[in-house]
Image (cartoon, rainbow, N blue to C red):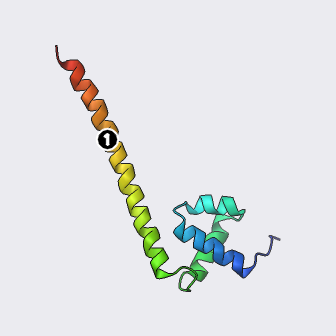
Amino acid sequence: MGLKRTNEFRQDAVRIALTSGLTRKQVADDLGVGMSTLNKWITAHRDTDVVSKEDLGLAQENDRLRRENRILKEEREILKKATVFFASQNP
């Protein structure tokens, strides 16, 4: 039988999973719980006030900005490689 976690621990786990920017797998590993357990807690607490709408909105914006930043870095690396390639083509 698994370790019984307090409701406060579960709420903190949900808050971290939804607002930290970490993957659920990372959060589950860090907290020492299984992925399915964390997902159950998130489902159970999703409609509660564990995470304020403002915090959730900020977390979603952070996720969007992280994705955009990753894409821009990838594009910059491609342009650097293209610059080197075309510079080497000139006689």
Q: Residue at x 60, y 82 (%)?
A: 44
How far across and how far down the image is residue 75, in percent? 31, 43
- Crowd tier of the residue under label 1, counting other residues whose Cα lies within 10 Å: few below 14, some 14–19, many 20 or above: few
How far across and how far down the image is residue 80, in percent? 30, 33
Residue 22 vertical placement versus 7 (above, below): above
Q: Place residue 46 in its image quadrant.
A: bottom right
Q: Place residue 63 in its image quadrant.
A: bottom left
Q: Tell me: 1 left or right of 51.
A: right
How far across and how far down the image is residue 15, in percent? 58, 73
Q: Residue at x 33, y 48 (%)?
A: 72
Q: Residue at x 83, y 71 (%)?
A: 1
Q: Tell me: 43 left or right of 70.
A: right
Which residue is tagged 1? 76
Amino acid carrying label 1: it is: Arg
Residue 19 vertical placement versus 83 (above, below): below
The residue most toward the right is: 1
Residue 88 vertical placement versus 20 (above, below): above
The residue most toward the top is: 91
Q: Residue at x 67, y 59 (%)?
A: 29
Q: Tell me: 35 left or right of 21.
A: right
The residue most toward the left is: 91
Q: Place residue 28 in its image quadrant.
A: bottom right
Q: Check the picture and name the quadrant holding the C terminus.
A: top left
- Callout 1: SS: helix
The one of 50 and 5 positioned closer to us in this rendering? 50
